[in-house]
Image: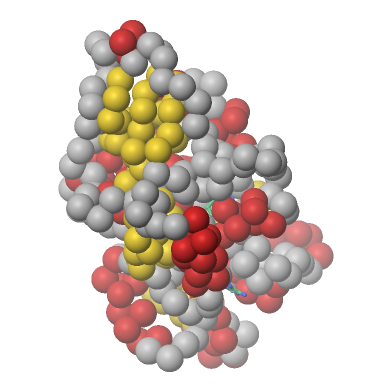
């Protein structure tokens, strides 16, 4: 873990989600590959300061809540020592789940809506029930953008549709209905100019349907590939609609963000929306870790269970590792 010196902070992690990209990183298929042995998994999470190095006592105090600024911090652990410039403080009134999913899930949703600025303010997305998707729905509502949200059919789908509409989804459609003639007609009648922005976390046939519904010059922004299928688009959409295929990666945005003020401003804006209850965190299933009390083999088993649970389809819950039961 390193040593606490005058310029560092001792942190206790409270909770950290298991996101698909964390698993990709462990599989070695993510662009950032932590050094092994000794690599620590987990890219986002919420921690609190439990000890402050002497030189930092003017600006930091015990109890400050923090999130990592950059990817690869290693958030699946109970304690960490960090330099102040690796962290960002989050206000105390932000609920823990929102704070723990802020630096990747919430910031990604925010950046994609801001940076790809849809000309006609209509957004369509797949994987709308994902952590990012739910934040997209709520931010669209807060920013006054209608959103069409695609999910996969499942038992109890009406409850999920109701839940997403309650978050602010203008429409929720089933992936399985997209290629039907009546759905195509519905799109033409309801959104005659198409969508300025389509957010794609799935790929395969799902992304093709998103591309088909773009407006002239609209952008399909791919930020995930949950189906593991390629995003293929017919030439006619390029020729006759001049659509744009773009990509987004929060990790790249963070690496390239030299002006930390822009970063702070985003976090403050999101913190404001959260404190006004305009944004709520995704539903989570907690997996409780008290590493101090668990034998090594028990904690390994628990990690394996958590990772396998996080990869199950149709669960509607994000797996959240909880290191301190009293906090959340
Ligand atoms: N580029 C970036 O900076 C960035 C940032 C954050 C996230 N992401 C990516 O965004 C995606 C969502 O991340 P998240 O953390 O929000 O995920 P999450 O909360 O774990 O949700 C996973 C989502 O993927 C869907 N899904 C799983 N397998 C699927 C399949 N075979 N076909 C279609 N949908 C499938 C799930 O739908 P069901 O409920 O139907 O199973 C669910 O909507 C991931 O690909 C992640 O890597 C990228």
Image: 281 above or below 229: above
Q: In this orientation, does residue 267 appear?
A: no
> 61 or 160, which is in the foreground?
61
> 287 or 178, which is in the foreground?
287
> Who's the residue at 57% across and 53% down the image?
22
Q: Is residue 156 left or right of residue 303?
A: left
Q: In this orientation, does residue 202 appear?
A: yes
> Who's the residue at 40% across and 38% down the image?
79
Q: Position of residue 219 (x, y in %)?
A: 61, 54
Q: Is residue 248 left or right of residue 156?
A: right
In which quadrant of the rendered view does residue 319 lie?
A: bottom left
- Quadrant for ligand 1 reads bottom right
> Who's the residue at 48% across and 79% down the image?
314
Q: Position of residue 223 (x, y in %)?
A: 60, 54
Q: Position of residue 4 (x, y in %)?
A: 41, 20
Q: Is residue 243 left or right of residue 264?
A: right
Image: 6 above or below 328: above
In which quadrant of the rendered view does residue 62 lie?
A: top left
Residue lying farthest to the top in this orientation: 55
> 215 or 113, which is in the foreground?
113
């Amino acid at each position: 873990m390193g040593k606490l010196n005058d310029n560092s902070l001792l942190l206790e992690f409270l909770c950290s989600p298991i996101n698909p990209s964390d698993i990709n990183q462990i599989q070695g298929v993510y662009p950032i590959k932590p050094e092994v042995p000794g690599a620590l998994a987990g890219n986002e999470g919420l921690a609190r300061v439990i000890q402050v190095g002497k030189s930092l006592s003017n600006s930091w105090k015990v109890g400050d809540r923090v999130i990592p600024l950059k990817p690869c911090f290693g958030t699946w652990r109970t304690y960490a020592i960090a330099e102040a410039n690796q962290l960002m403080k989050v206000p105390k009134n932000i609920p823990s789940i929102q704070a723990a999913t802020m630096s990747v899930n919430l910031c990604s949703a925010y950046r994609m809506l801001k940076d790809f600025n849809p000309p006609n303010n209509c957004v369509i997305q797949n994987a709308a029930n994902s952590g990012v998707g739910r934040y997209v729905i709520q931010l669209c509502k807060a920013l006054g953008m209608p959103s069409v949200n695609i999910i996969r059919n499942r038992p109890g789908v009406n409850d999920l549709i109701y839940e997403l509409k309650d978050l602010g989804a203008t429409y929720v459609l089933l992936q399985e209905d997209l290629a039907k003639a009546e759905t195509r007609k519905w799109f033409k009648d309801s959104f005659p100019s198409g969508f300025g922005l389509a957010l794609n976390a799935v790929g395969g046939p799902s992304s093709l349907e998103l591309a088909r519904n773009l407006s002239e010059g609209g952008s399909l922004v791919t930020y995930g590939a949950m189906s593991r299928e390629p995003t293929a688009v017919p030439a006619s959409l390029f020729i006759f609609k001049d659509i744009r295929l773009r990509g987004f990666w929060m990790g790249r945005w963070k690496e390239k963000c030299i002006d930390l003020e822009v970063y702070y401003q985003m976090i403050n804006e999101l913190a404001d929306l959260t404190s006004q209850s305009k944004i709520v965190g995704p539903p989570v299933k907690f997996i409780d870790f008290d590493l101090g009390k668990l034998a090594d083999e028990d904690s390994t088993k628990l990690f394996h269970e958590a990772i396998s649970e996080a990869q199950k389809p149709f669960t509607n819950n994000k797996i959240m590792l909880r290191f301190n039961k009293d906090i959340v």
